[in-house]
Amino acid sequence: MASDQYSVNSKVAKRDTVRYSVDSERLATAVRDACVQVAVAAYEDAAMSGLCHEGAWECAVDAMCSLNVGQLIAALQKERPHV
């Protein structure tokens, strides 16, 4: 059964491989910064709306999960298309 799981995981890994001209460190930094930015904004908005800490945290996590990484990559490529 472990080999079946490995086979599925390797297929997913191959499918999800980023084939863009954006270097890994720059992409990781951009994703981290974007996650922090959307999480803080969502948390503050939720807290201002009266949600408790747990509710505001759920909103922050949802915002990070909803981040469109494809758009972020496209923006990075426009900045420096041949990196």
Image (cartoon, rainbow, N blue to C red):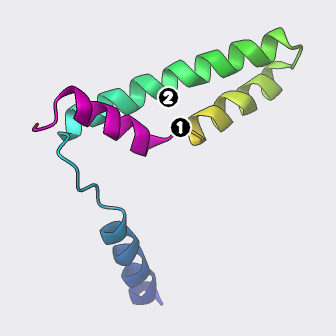
Quadrant housing residue 29 = top left
**Extreme-left residue of the structure:** 82
10 Å neighbourhood of mark 2: few (<14), some, or many (≥20)?
A: many
- Tell whether 68 sits left or right of 58: left
Q: Position of residue 3 (x, y in %)?
A: 39, 88
Magenta stretch encompasses residue 71: yes
Viewer-nearest of labels 2 and 1?
A: 1
**Extreme-top residue of the structure:** 48
Quadrant housing residue 61 = top right
**Labelled disc at residue 35:** 2
Estimate the spatial distance between the alpha carbons at disc 2 and disc 1, rounded to whole Å: 7 Å
Q: Nearer the viewer, residue 74 or 37?
A: 74
- Tell whether 65 sits left or right of 29: right
Look at 16% across and 36% down and name the residue there.
81
- Asked whether the residues under the numbered discs 2 and 1 touch, taking CB atoms below 8 Å apart as contact, a structural biologist would say yes
Of marks 2 and 1, which one's residue comes earlier in the chain?
Answer: 2
Which amino acid does the dot numbered 2 rest on?
Answer: Cys
Reading the image, the residue beneath label 1 is 67
- Tell whether 32 sits left or right of 47: left
Q: Which residues are magenta?
A: 67-82
10 Å neighbourhood of mark 1: few (<14), some, or many (≥20)?
A: some
Which amino acid does the dot numbered 1 rest on?
Answer: Leu
Q: Position of residue 70 (x, y in %)?
A: 41, 45
Q: Position of residue 56 (x, y in %)?
A: 77, 23
Look at 74% across and 15% down and name the residue there.
45
Relative to 79, say whether 28 is above or below. Answer: below
Q: Nearer the viewer, residue 9 or 80?
A: 80
What secondary structure is marked by label 1?
Answer: loop
Magenta stretch encompasses residue 53: no
What secondary structure is marked by label 2?
Answer: helix
